[in-house]
């Protein structure tokens, strides 16, 4: 008999440094513990302990006596929830697994907002100006209250509801600006040496995780797509990007996963199926040895030549997608070795609004490779030197252009396959793609 985690639950997962299934199922024992400790922080401790006991991937609990851990946690008195949280974190550290972790209510809310791909606020990306340290707008998010109100890149935020932002961190400012949809906030804006107050109404905003653009590279048309996180909205955004670029008659694609820390497993599966018509995507194995293999389902949107850009910050869901495309010979991988995370985690909401992420399974690429601590080695390795990194970080508009050496190398890798494809009638170009030559090499 198969036990948790099974495929239907793992598909609710996220991969921020691991793979996370967002569930909130409590064991029958929890109701007993909750009745005994309902007015005590011990209720949350016992709730969290039982989840780990039931689901943690290592049945030996890192050779820790997990029953003794429970007795220790529940034998203490806690003056506050924070004291109980600290004890739980210490207990979880004994598992020697940084991805099994307790999230206080604020941290849990931040994670759920991140995986949902939404926030409630006015839609501003902020940074501290390098010289003046003024709180500065990087850009307003499209279709947000900020963009509708006319806030521009480079505007300075002088005050938030009358509170000066002088010396304020970006994190503090973001916390003040966020709030329940429908509530009001007033920002004092400085632009061209003129200051003015701007009232805004907060709204629920879908965060853009996919950006795309047509690049004309000589006589070839390249569809460039950058995916920053695998949120719940990322598949729809990716589908729209691919379809838009196909309507513009691109000859091939560059998919940029550099710096992408992961996200929802379901999102990585759905996006894999947009590029991969057949074959396995990923295999997961739980602590009982139960194995699930997720397959492509013949719903690919395109078979045009594809190159994927990765670096050592491409992790988890990024590696699931990269591994699926590489092992099925669907794409050439360009860049530097990926991060190397192959753990599946479930995220549970706890009764006081906090949360628990617990590692429940291990995943393998379609070829059976365990990438833990090793990552995926690109077919074509090319790194950026310090100056190139500074240049791109200082001007994000250069990322995915000829000024970006890794992107330029990806285009170079695609050229032969595109040239061969262009010899075929356009009607046949959505048939199985021209095989890309995949010699492992290093570019200095």
Image (cartoon, rainbow, N blue to C red):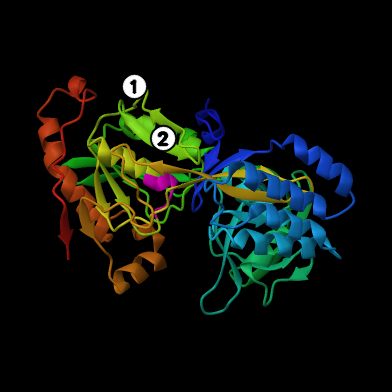
Residue at (16% x, 52% y) in the render: 440
Specify whether residue 95 is in view: yes
Q: Where is 289 relative to 201, above or below?
A: above
Name the residue beneath numbered marker 2. 271
Towards the viewer: 310 or 242: 310
Towards the viewer: 380 or 196: 380
Q: Where is 441 relative to 292, above or below?
A: below
Label 2: element kind:
helix
Q: Which residues, given as a range, are shown in magenta?
A: 314-319
Category of crowding for the residue at label 1, using alpha-carbon neighbours closer than 10 angstroms: few (below 14), some (14–19), many (at least 20): few
Q: Where is 414 relative to 435, above or below?
A: below
Q: Give the CA separation, mark 1 to mark 2.
A: 13 Å
Specify whether residue 121 is in view: no
Task: Confirm whether the magenta stretch covers residue 317.
Answer: yes
Residue at (58% x, 69% y) in the render: 192
Q: Residue furthest toward the bottom?
A: 131
Image-based side of 131 in relation to 160, left or right: left
Q: Quadrant of residue 20?
A: top right
Towards the viewer: 432 or 351: 351
Instruction: Give me the disc on residue 298.
Output: 1
Residue at (72% x, 65% y) in the render: 86
Residue 44 horizontal/vertical position (percent) = 77, 50
Residue 444 horizontal/vertical position (percent) = 17, 66
Mark 1 or mark 2: which comes first in sequence? 2
Residue 187 horizontal/vertical position (percent) = 72, 61
């Amino acid at each position: 008999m198969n036990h948790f985690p099974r495929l239907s639950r793992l598909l609710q997962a996220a991969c921020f440094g691991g793979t996370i299934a967002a569930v909130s199922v409590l064991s029958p024992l929890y109701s007993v513990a909750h009745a005994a400790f309902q007015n005590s922080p011990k209720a949350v401790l016992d709730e969290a302990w039982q989840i780990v006991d039931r689901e943690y991937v290592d049945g030996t609990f890192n050779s820790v006596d997990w029953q003794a851990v429970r007795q220790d946690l529940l034998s203490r008195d806690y003056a506050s929830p924070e004291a109980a949280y600290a004890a739980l974190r210490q207990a979880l550290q004994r598992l020697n697994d940084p991805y099994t972790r307790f999230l206080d209510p604020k941290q849990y809310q931040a994670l759920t907002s991140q995986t949902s791909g939404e926030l409630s606020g006015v839609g501003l990306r902020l940074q501290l100006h390098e010289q003046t340290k003024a709180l500065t707008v990087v850009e307003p998010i499209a279709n947000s209250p900020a963009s509708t109100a006319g806030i521009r890149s480079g505007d300075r935020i002088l005050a938030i509801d009358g509170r000066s932002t002088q010396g304020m961190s970006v994190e503090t400012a973001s916390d003040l600006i966020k709030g329940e949809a429908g509530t009001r906030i007033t920002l004092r804006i400085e632009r061209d040496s003129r200051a003015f107050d701007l009232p805004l109404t907060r709204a629920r905003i879908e965060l853009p995780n996919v950006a795309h653009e047509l690049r004309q590279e000589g006589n070839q048309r390249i569809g460039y797509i950058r995916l920053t996180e695998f949120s719940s909205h990322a598949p729809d955004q990716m589908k729209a990007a691919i379809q838009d670029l196909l309507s513009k008659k691109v000859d091939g694609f560059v998919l940029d996963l550099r710096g992408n820390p992961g996200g929802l497993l379901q999102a990585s599966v759905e996006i894999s199926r947009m590029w991969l018509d057949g074959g396995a995507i990923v295999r997961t194995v739980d602590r009982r040895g139960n194995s699930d293999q997720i397959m492509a389902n013949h719903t690919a949107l395109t078979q045009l030549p594809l190159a994927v850009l990765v670096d050592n910050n491409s992790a988890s869901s990024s590696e699931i997608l990269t591994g699926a495309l590489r092992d099925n010979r669907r794409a050439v991988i360009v860049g530097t070795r990926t991060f190397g995370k192959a753990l599946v985690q479930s995220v549970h909401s706890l009764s006081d609004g906090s949360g628990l992420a617990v590692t429940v399974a291990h995943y393998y690429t379609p070829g059976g490779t365990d990438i833990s601590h090793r990552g995926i080695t690109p077919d074509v390795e090319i790194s950026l030197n310090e100056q190139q990194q500074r240049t791109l970080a200082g001007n994000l508009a250069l990322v995915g252009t000829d000024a970006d050496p890794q992107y330029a190398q990806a285009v170079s890798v695609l050229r032969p396959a595109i040239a061969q494809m262009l010899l075929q009638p356009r009607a046949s170009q959505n048939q199985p793609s021209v095989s890309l030559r995949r010699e492992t090499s290093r570019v200095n």
